[in-house]
Amino acid sequence: MNEVRERTLIDLFKALDGIYGSNYECKYYPCHFHGQDCTFCYCPFYPCLIYDLGGELIISPDGEFQWSCKGCSWIHRRENVEEIVMRLSNYPKQRLIEEDWLFFNRILQEIYYGEELGVKLENCYNLMPAILRNKDCEEIGDIEFLAVKIVDFEIVDVRRIKSLDEASNEVVIPLKAGGEVYGIDEIGRKVVCKI
């Protein structure tokens, strides 16, 4: 298990034993906003790959792809923390240790969108229906979007693809460029959407 995931599970199990709120003693407080709930310093849904929460895919200084949560404050709002704890407390701790990224992402979608909107296909998990939901979109010609390979909660590869058929055991998300995302909507149209 990687170090970040281990720390994430430690935070999660502390939360399941009792929400503790803001951590005024942390040298980074407030890392998102004053009064934030610090229960999940390490997010159990990382990397969520959902732009709606304020995160984005970046390339680190050492050239690796990472999901940046800098713009996400959702996990630090008390009402969301309470909902997460309630949902995840329904599972034995051992199961939470053993489950994969998809298990946690489905729970996140249920909490955030009210239902799972991502679609499990034969060759990939298509997260675009969730990310493009309720966006101002217009159909366009040729586009590229992203196939993200996640292994043990780590992004190990990202590639641009033009068709869902090109994905291979990857998570498919829109390509973000500035304030727009490029992807395929739930009815199969190639679209550009404002975010």
Image: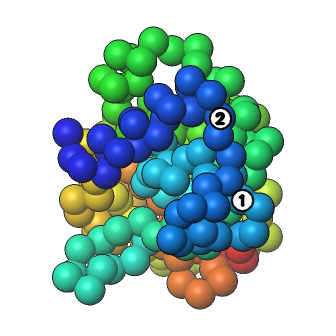
Q: Secondary structure at mark 1?
A: loop
Q: Is residue 194 above or below residue 15?
A: below
Label number found at residue 86: none
Which residue is label 2 attached to? 19
Q: Residue at x 50, y 49 (%)?
A: 43
In this rendered view, identify the residue nearer to me: 77 or 195.
77
In this rendered view, identify the residue nearer to me: 47 or 38.
38
Q: CA distance from mark 2 to mark 1?
A: 13 Å
Q: Give left or right: position of 77 versus 62.
A: right
In this rendered view, identify the residue nearer to me: 14 or 139.
14
Q: Secondary structure at mark 2?
A: loop
Disc 1 residue crowd, few under 14, some 14–19, many 20+, Cα 10 Å:
many
Q: Give left or right: position of 101 versus 116.
A: left
Q: Is residue 18 above or below residue 49?
A: above
Q: Quadrant of the C terminus?
A: bottom right
Q: Quadrant of the N terminus?
A: top left
Which residue is label 1 attached to? 36
